Amino acid sequence: MLEYNEIKPGKHIVYEGEPYEVLESHVARTQQRKPQNQTKLKNLLNGRLVPATFRASERVDEADIGSRAIKFLYSNRGEYWFCEENDPRKRFTLDATLVGEPAKFLKENMLVSVLTFGLPAASNAAQAGEDEEEKIIGVKLPVKVELLVREAPPSIKGDTASGGGKVVTLETGATITAPLFVNAGDLIRVNTETGAYVERVEKR
C-alpha cells in the first residue's frame, strides 16, 4: 500500500480496479484544508489519461507490473503472433490495439517485452504456491531497432547540402522521414518511441 504522498511519477497503482501509471503529482497544502496529492494517471489497459486527487487519509495498492521477453513471429489481419522466448511451441496472439503504434516496427524474430498486471484477487493463490493470474497489458519494443530501408526516392545531386529529408519505406512496411543521403538497402537505426530516424548503421 502507498500513502497519499508516495503516489509519485513512475509509480504503478491500482485505481478503481485497474492499473495506472502515475505521470504527474503535486502535493498541495493549504491552511484551510488537509494536504492533497493532485495527480495525472495513465490507464495501462486503454491508455486513457485521468486526473485523480488523493487525500491524506487515503492509501492505494501498488500495481504488480511484471515484464518478460517474448519473440515476435508474424502478423495477420490485425493480430500479432508471439511465442515465449525459449519455447516456440507456446504461441499466443495479441490484438493490434494492445501492441500499439510501435507495432509498425516489429520484424520477425524480434525480441520484445510483454508487460503483465498481476490481479490482486490472485494474490492469495500465489502465496499458496499456485500460478498467479496475470493480464497482458502491453508490449514494449526496444527503444532503438535496426531496420532495412526497402524503398527510398533517389537523391538528386546537391540536395544533401540542404539538410532536408525524404520519406522512406522500411522492411516492416513502416514509413519514416530520413535524411536525403539514405538509400534503399541501407540499414538504419530507428527510435520506436518517437518513430524518428536516429542514424545510418551501414550502407549496403
Image (cartoon, rainbow, N blue to C red):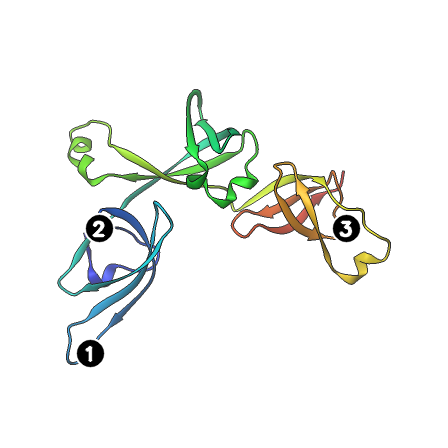
Amino acid type, residue under disc 2 in the picture: Glu
- Crowding at label 2, few (<14), some or many (≥20) Cα neighbours within 10 Å? few
Q: Farthest residue toward the right? A: 157
Q: Which mark is residue 72?
A: none
Q: Farthest residue toward the bottom? A: 31
Lower position in the chain sequence, tag 1 or tag 2:
2
Closest to the observer, 39 or 131: 39
Residue positioned 75% across, 40% down in the render: 184
Q: Distance between the residues labelled 1 and 2?
A: 27 Å
Lower position in the chain sequence, tag 1 or tag 3:
1
Residue matched to label 1: 30
Amino acid type, residue under disc 1 in the picture: Thr
Look at discs 3 and 2 and give the one toward the viewer.
Answer: 2
Q: Where is residue 189 in the image (x, y as percent from the top left)?
A: 63, 45
Lower position in the chain sequence, tag 3 or tag 2:
2
- Crowding at label 3, few (<14), some or many (≥20) Cα neighbours within 10 Å? some
Q: Which mark is residue 181?
A: 3
Q: Is mark 1 on a helix, strand or loop?
A: loop
Residue 49 vertical position relative to residue 113 in the rendered view, above or below:
below
Q: Is mark 3 on a helix, strand or loop?
A: loop
Q: Where is residue 54 in the image (x, y as percent from the top left)?
A: 21, 63
Closest to the observer, 42 or 65: 42
Residue 31 sits in quarter: bottom left
Residue positioned 31% across, 51% down in the render: 20
Q: In this view, does 60 lie to the left or right of 100?
A: left
Amino acid type, residue under disc 3 in the picture: Phe
Residue 25 vertical position relative to residue 73 in the rendered view, above or below:
below
Q: Where is residue 9 in the image (x, y as percent from the top left)?
A: 34, 59
Q: Are marks 1 and 2 in contact (CB under 8 Å)?
A: no
Residue 172 sits in quarter: top right
Closest to the observer, 74 or 9: 74
Residue matched to label 2: 16
